[in-house]
Amino acid sequence: MPDVNTTAKDRKPEEKGKDDSPKTKEEKPIPPTPTAEIKSNIALIERAVADLEPRFTHRVLRSLTTLRKRLDDKIIRDAIEDNYPSESTVKTSLLSWLPPASPADHSMDVDTATAPDGPTTPAPSPKPTSDPVPEVEIYLRLLLIHHLHTSKENYAKSLDLCKETVDKMQSLNRRSMDPISAKIWFAVERSYELGGGLADARPMFLAAQRTASLRHDNDTQASLVNRLLRSYLHYNLYDQADKLVSKTIFPASASNSQFGRYHYFLGRIKAVQLNYTAAHTNLQQAIRRAPPAKTAPGFYQAVHKLFVVVELLMGDIPDRSTFRHPVLQKALRAYFDIVKAVRTGSLSEFQATLTKHASQFEADKTYTLIVRLRQNVIKTGIRRLSLSYSRISLRDICLKLHLDSEEDAEYIVGKAIRDGVIEGRIVHEKGWMECEGRKNGYGPEVSEVFGRRIGYCLELHNQSVKAMRYPLNAHRKELAAAEGAREREKELAKEIQEGELDDDEGMGDF
């Protein structure tokens, strides 16, 4: 009898149900409600203060971005009432920043509490008898500030809350509050920016930065340096931003997100100062330390826009795969047109593209840098002509590159020869340029390029080693194991000396 392959259609319904039953039972875990998440975060903050372990506070702050998008008045009010006793003055102060509860919210609370025949609901947790640690109050104030940012009518209210929170935070002066303080300063900057007075917050940031450096508060110091650099660059104060960088030392223990912002600001400063090599290095570090593209698409796009322009100013052509990235494809469309114009060396195409996308470049604050690319376009065109012709008249160069006169063409060609862009010479008597052969692939320039690559790889290795995290007190387990082994060796040697154990005993097959 031939073998028959049974398919899913030929099986009995009972067999099919048996096979698929494990799949139907697998359900995704239900995410906690915002109120429950805030309560668990408060427990982690109290544990961090009790155990002097800031990593629990950092774990709480990592969920801030997703949590603040789910907040509303009722969630924050419930979180405050569940974690503070009824007679608490801190509770009254926090609730004063929220609108009064509507009668519908009170009726919902009563219905859920007195429903005897409904579905089983979790028993309400007992009311606390004392206030939690001060870090919890600052954390709830941080959530309140971000919640007030969602409505334009509450911008002035958020400014008042920020000033009160900063005064309270500085009066407490607790080291366990440092990670939350760094986030508070970001919220303060956002409040001033939404209120239209970002420059008014600069004296406050400078005073707080000096205090943080004296207290060795690395988290707050890194956040405030980035806040000040962003404020300076927002108003195009590049000289003051450069002086701030030269007078301060960015903490080495700062988080990757703070380092990414810092390297991005440094890249913008160095690019304006014509130091394209340093700008390229800093932007590479910013891209490497930045959050994933889907997590922070805005920052990822801003860094790559400046990175593409700096690569063009250095004389390199960016990789085409950069423009195919799903997060960057639409944002870098105008920059891709600029790259094509620079690559072909067409001055007319470059001017047309610059005029077409001028508004976007001005919004991205890269217009002044892209204007500098005109000389690079001309150099690229001259390089292409030098490879195509062994001798070409200045008149033809003027026509092909769309220059104004032959004198301009002679000046540009002479500068390109002096800079080493092309190999050739100008014959003034006959009015043409004679081009020499191409350079070989060896020489000091190639060794310099390899030296820069090797240096970058070594720096990448050093930064990766510094960024590695190790479990706490792991070395103590190794020490305990080593001490136990030594004790066993001593006991074994003692037994051998006393004659209780032969030399060959306990050696197994040996």
Image (cartoon, rainbow, N blue to C red):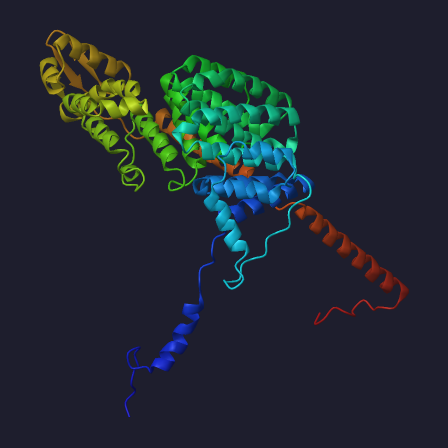
Please state which of residues 174 and 406 is positioned toward the viewer in this rendering.
174
| Quadrant in which residue 500 is drawn | bottom right
Q: Position of residue 505 (x, y in %)?
A: 79, 70
Which quadrant of the rendered structure holds the C terminus? bottom right
Left of 510 or right of it: where is 346?
left
Picture coordinates of residue 481 (x, y %)? 72, 54
Residue at the right extreme, as displayed: 498
Q: Is residue 353 above or below residue 460?
A: above
Horizontal and vertical percent position of residue 60: 55, 42
Q: Position of residue 83 (x, y in %)?
A: 61, 43
Task: Work out whether residue 490 or residue 125 is closer to the camera in this orientation and state it.
Answer: 125
Observer-nearest of 391 and 483: 483
Q: Residue at x 36, y 37 (%)?
A: 297
Quadrant of the image occupied by residue 207? top right
The answer to whether residue 296 is seen in the rendering is: yes
Q: Quadrant of the N terminus?
A: bottom left
Number of numbered tags placed on the structure image: 0
Q: Is residue 59 visible?
A: no
Query: Where, by quadrant of the figure, is residue 22 drawn?
Result: bottom left
Q: Nearer the viewer, residue 85 or 503?
A: 85
Above or below residue 239? Residue 304 is below
Q: Is residue 5 left or right of residue 113?
A: left
Q: Is residue 284 above or below residue 347?
A: below
